[in-house]
Amino acid sequence: MGRYSVRLPSVSGRSSFAYSITAFSNLPKRVNGVLSFGHIMTEMTLELVSTAKCYEGEQRVYRHHSGTLDCDMTFGVFLPPAALEDKPCPVLFFLSGLTCSHENFIQKSGFQAHAARHNLIVVNPDTSPRGVEIAGQDDAYDFGSGAGFYVDAKLEPWSKHYKMYSYVTQELVDVVNANLPVVPGKRGIFGHSMGGHGALICALKNPGLYQSVSAFAPIANPTQCPWGQKAFAGYLGPNPDDWALWDATHLVSQYESTPQELFIDQGAADNFLAGKQLLPENLLAAADGNDHIQTIFKKREGYDHSYFYIATFVGEHIAYHAALLTAVA
């Protein structure tokens, strides 16, 4: 175990300041001026794009070059009041849905008031690589730009850049650990729709990486719905066995590791629920047959798939994560 000190940019007219953070064996090492995270080499340079005071904390946006995705990426960071006083806080990652960037959750959900109350750092990345040149990536809302599906693509030309799973579960975690005052081992993840799918698979494929998991209206069984089938065929190829490795329902049915609780939230008036794009019932059925998985399922009468729905219940989700992330082991 060691310590790693990073100087962050000056904000709001104050002098720049440094965080000294305790880290474990995945502490990045500098090789010829470049930080190595084992699976990649990436410049550890964060550019502060914007900052705004919010509920006595700060809502920031950072940009950095991702070695995993081979492009520049932007992500949001909410620092609660305690973090601004250099006090380590648990961190909660939010993954957004189709067509979104990092901006939607920041601007529409109202999560900051709840994160400030519970002193949680909240990090929300983009939904796909940006600024790369791939023919056809902007042709459809549900594939390519804004639709990375949190998988690691196997097919060319997507496999060079579209590795959102590795970016979220490895590189972004390392960047956050090295640059923000987080409590080691106190990490949660949640998301919406495609991002709900992402949150579920990131947790299920990495037992112990996240201590809390929840999802708003997740694409819970993508191998069985049009959205998932299109994305998986395009990124992974035609083999259904390859698809299953990225399907939360399949992963739940096979899960045999550390007991995991999944909080699933669903609007009853969601047109994508009626259109069989989400299929939470399949995931719940798989969990019923697995003693290693516990589920909380809340169906919200009258609520649809929109950010009005998320804004209504995001406080409940953040309180849920806070209770698990601040619990004494």
Image (cartoon, rainbow, N blue to C red):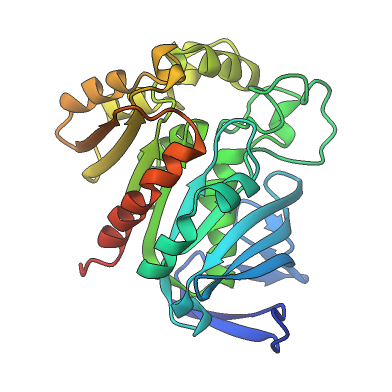
- Within the image, what quadrant is residue 285 found in? top left
Q: Position of residue 184 (x, y in %)?
A: 40, 69
In this picture, is 263 found above or below 20? above
Can residue 46 be seen? no
Q: Position of residue 182 (x, y in %)?
A: 46, 71
Q: Residue at x 50, y 39 (%)?
A: 307
The quadrant of the rendering that contains the N terminus is bottom left
Q: Residue at x 71, y 40 (%)?
A: 129
In this picture, is 293 found above or below 54? above
Left or right of 74: which side holds 189? left
Q: Position of residue 37 (x, y in %)?
A: 60, 59
As drawn, the residue found furthest toward the front would be: 302
Can residue 72 be seen? yes
The number of numbered discs placed on residues in the rendered structure image is 0
Left or right of 155: which side holds 24? left
Q: Residue at x 64, y 45 (%)?
A: 126
Left or right of 194: which side holds 328? left
| In-front residue for pair 33/131 | 131
In this picture, is 111 found above or below 266? below
The quadrant of the rendering that contains the C terminus is bottom left
Q: Residue at x 36, y 63 (%)?
A: 186
In this picture, is 273 found above or below 90? above
- Within the image, what quadrant is residue 143 found in? top right
| In-front residue for pair 168/41 | 168
Q: Position of residue 6 (x, y in %)?
A: 63, 79
Left or right of 280: which side holds 150? right
